[in-house]
Image (tube, grey):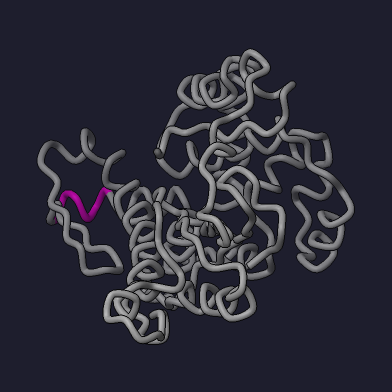
Amino acid sequence: MQTIPNYTIEKEAPGGLLGDRDLFLADEGFYLFQCDLSGADGWTVAAYCKMLGDSAMLDDYEAGIKPYARIALLIAGKTEYADMLDRKELKAFLKTYKLGDIQKLIAKRVQHGGAYLEGGLTISRNVLKDSEGKNYLSPKEGERLKQWYLNKYWGIPKWHDWIGRRLKERPVLTAASGQVRQFFGRPDEVITKAVAFEPQANTTYATNLAAWRLWSDCDNRRNDSTMANKCRLRIEPLHQVHDALIGQFPIQDTQWAVPKIRSYFQNPLLIAGQTITIPFEGAYGPAWGKQNVGTI
């Protein structure tokens, strides 16, 4: 189900065909919800940047500014805002200025590629792939945007160097969950996998913790006379996609369920000496592709 598309606008969908998520319905009398971590892998990168002396990315995240938004502003020609140091003013501007979908797609690929040692050609190919062939970014422009991003958040190259030194000393990395990964091969051959390991592992761990808290919550049980129902969950987990948790709850339990789901995602992680609680965005409705009733 990870590959089920989610096209909601015909002009953006390949062949004009909408995605299939609207076909996955909540049970009768239930709402289906989805919660996605906001920023996800980027929080780990930001924590390591601060550990190495550059707090700019973490400061942006904590101010409610996603780094890809700065890249998108640069693409849109809003250079003065892309470079803006006053975060309150920038956040206020972003509330009034609508970033284009194409700009956001490209900016997210540049942020991802810059963090994970991708070159301009790879970023260009990924933009083409992610947009189903509708958008093109030249490798030269992809490299230019990536270099701007790495100059803006200069702690990222320092983090790459730090990972490289670790691999030479002892090719073992440990994520926030305690998960240990040993890398085999020459440091210059495995470094791309190494830089991606902990950010991705921490994102998955944060989502797993939310699912575990949902499952193990003693209050999240049906309370009636039959033993079978006493073992059933009120908020039911249905699916998980890396940084997203999907489930359903009875419509009559909405006022109780929404704050409960919020509480499941309050999981502080110790990352690079920083205590980080990765935030999330969520909504609910009658179907996986139609969560239009309310937010979480």
Q: Is residue 155 visible?
A: no
Q: Which residues are magenta?
A: 164-169
Q: Is residue 140 above or below residue 214?
A: above
- 108 magenta-colored: no
- Out of 184 and 259, give the one closest to the viewer: 259
Q: Residue at x 65, y 46 (%)?
A: 290
| Numbered-mark total | 0
Q: Is residue 104 above or below residue 279?
A: above
Q: Residue at x 31, y 38 (%)?
A: 192
- 167 magenta-colored: yes
- Out of 251 and 140, give the one closest to the viewer: 251
Answer with the quarter of the image where residue 193 lies.
Answer: top left
* Residue 178 placement (x, y as % from top left): 21, 69
* Residue 5 placement (x, y as % from top left): 52, 32
In the picture as drawn, the residue positioned furthest to the front comes out as 225
Secondary structure that dominates the magenta span = helix
Answer with the quarter of the image where residue 223 lies.
Answer: bottom left
Q: Is residue 34 visible?
A: yes
* Residue 286 placement (x, y as % from top left): 62, 52
Q: Is residue 67 above or below residue 270?
A: above
In the picture as drawn, the residue positioned furthest to the right comes out as 96
Answer with the quarter of the image where residue 219 lies.
Answer: bottom left
* Residue 21 placement (x, y as % from top left): 54, 38
Quadrant showing the N terminus? top left
Q: Is residue 170 left or right of residue 192?
A: left
Quadrant showing the C terminus? bottom right
Q: Is residue 13 left or right of residue 217?
A: right
Q: Residue at x 61, y 61 (%)?
A: 281
- Out of 157 and 78, give the one closest to the viewer: 78
